[in-house]
Amino acid sequence: MRLAASRPARLLLIIGPLSGLGSLCVDMYLPALPSISRDLHAGTSAAQASLTTCLVGLALGQVLIGPVSDRLGRRRPLLFGLVAFIVAAAGCAVAPNIYVFLAFRFLQGLGGAAGIVVSRAIVRDRYEGPEAARFYSMLMTVVGVGPLLAPQLGAALLALGSWRSLFAALAVAGLVLMAVAYLFLPETLAPASRGTDTLDATLRAMRSVITDRAFLVNALACGIGFGAIFSYVSGAPFALENVFGLSPALFGIAFGVNGGGLIIASHLNGRLVGHLGPMRLFTYGAVGLAAGSVALLVVIATHALGLFAVLACMFLVLSSNGFVTPNAMALALNDFPQAAGSASALLGLLQFSIGAAAAPLVGVAGPRSDLPMGIAMACCGVSALTVRMLLVRRRPARPGQPAALPLAGPDDVGTEAAGPGCATQPGTA
C-alpha cells in the first residue's frame, strides 16, 4: 500500500533524489569520457557530444512532461520517465557504438527530466510564497550534494570496472527511485485541479506563462545562475589543474569546498526566507553573484593575488547561487498554481538551455586558458543582477486582481511588480 509523504522532511527525502537524477546522469560519467571515446572508437568531440545530447534531452523532456503532468497528475508521468531512464541507462551500458550510445544518452536525458520537472511541480502543489522558497532551498541543499559526489562516485566505479558498469549502476539507481516513488510518493495534484485542455489550449497556456513578465525575469535569473554554475563546472578543472597546477586530489577538495558553499547558502536561505522574504534574498544573492564573478574575471585577467583569490571568488559565486536559484524559482512559479507543471517545464528549459550554451564557451581558448571561464561567469553574474533590477519597475494592479501572496518579508518596504496575481507586494527595490 502506498504511504503518504505528508511531512516536509519525508517528502524532501523522496523528491530530492528524483530532482537530482538529471545532474547525476550528467556528472557521474564525466571521469569515464576518455574510456568511452577509446572503447567505442570515437573521437573526443563525439564522446563529449554525449553530454550535449543528454542536456538537450533534459531540456526538451521538461517541456514535454510538464504539461502532461498538469493533465494526468504527477505520479504517472514521473513513473514513465523513470522507466525511460532505466531503459536508457541499460542501453548505454551495452551500446556497441557511439551512435547508439548518443541515442540512449538523449533518452536518458528525457527520462531524467521527469524527476526534475515533477519534483518542482509537487512543491508548487503543496506550498506557495515563502514556504515554497524555503522548500526549494531545502531541495537545493539535497540536490547540491549530487554534483559534489557524482564525479567521485563515477571515478570509484570506474576503478572497480569498465565505464559500462557505471551505467549499469545508474540503471539500478533508477530502479530504486522508481520503487520508492511508486510506494511512498502520493499524488499531489487533485483531479479537480487537472487541466482538460486540448493541445492548442495547452500551447496557449504555455505562451501565457512565458510571456508573463514576472515569470520571465525570474526564470531568466534562475537560468543565468545555472549558466554560471555550468561555466564553473566546465572550466574549473582546466583552470585549477592546468593553470594553477592543482593535483586532481586537491582539485576535488577545492570543488567540494565550493560546492559546500552552495549547500550552506541554500540551507541558510531556507532559514531566513520567512523573515526577509524571497525577493530581498534574491537581491542579495544577485549582488553577490555579480560581485564575485566580476572579481573573478579581474583576478584572472590581471593575474593578481593568485590562487587563493580565485578560490575565494569561486566560493562567493557558488554561495550566492544558493540565494538566487531557490528564490527566483519560487517567484517564477508562484502565480501559476493551475499550470505548475508547464511553468516548471519552461523554467527547466531556460535553465538547461542557458547551461548548455554556456558550458562549451569556457574551452574556446584551449585547456590552458582560464580567461573564457572568467568572462562567461562574469557575463552570467552581471546579467543575473540586471534581470533582477527589471523587477524594480512598478506596474499598476489590474482591476479585480487577487491579493498578493506574501513573497516579501515583514521588514520589506516599497512595492514590486510581480506579475499576475501579485501586482503589488512588499519588497526591496
Image (cartoon, helix red, strand yellow):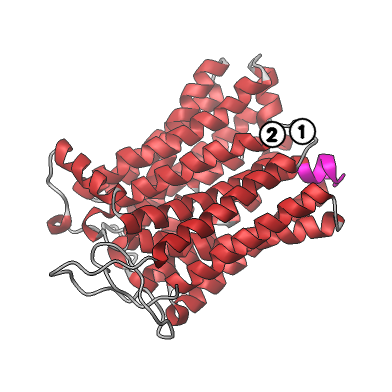
Q: Which residue is at 32% across, 61% downward?
A: 124
Which residue was labeled with disc 1? 367
Which region of the structure is painted magenta? Answer: 239-248
Relative to 272, say whether 54 is above or below.
Answer: above
Residue type marked 2 = Gly
Relative to 341, say whether 390 is above or below.
Answer: below
Label 2: few (<14), some (14–19) or many (≥20) C-alpha neighbours in 10 Å: some
Q: Position of residue 127 (x, y in %)?
A: 32, 68
Prevalent SS, magenta region: helix
Residue in front for this viewpoint, 55 or 413:
413
Which residue was labeled with disc 2? 363
Q: Position of residue 377 (x, y in %)?
A: 63, 49
Instruction: Name the residue furthest bottom.
Output: 411
Q: Which residue is at 56% across, 60% downward?
A: 321
Picture quarter with the C terminus: bottom left
Q: Is residue 320 left or right of residue 76?
A: right
Q: Which residue is at 69% across, 43% downward?
A: 373
Q: Which residue is at 53% across, 52% downward?
A: 383
Q: Position of residue 340 (x, y in %)?
A: 28, 55
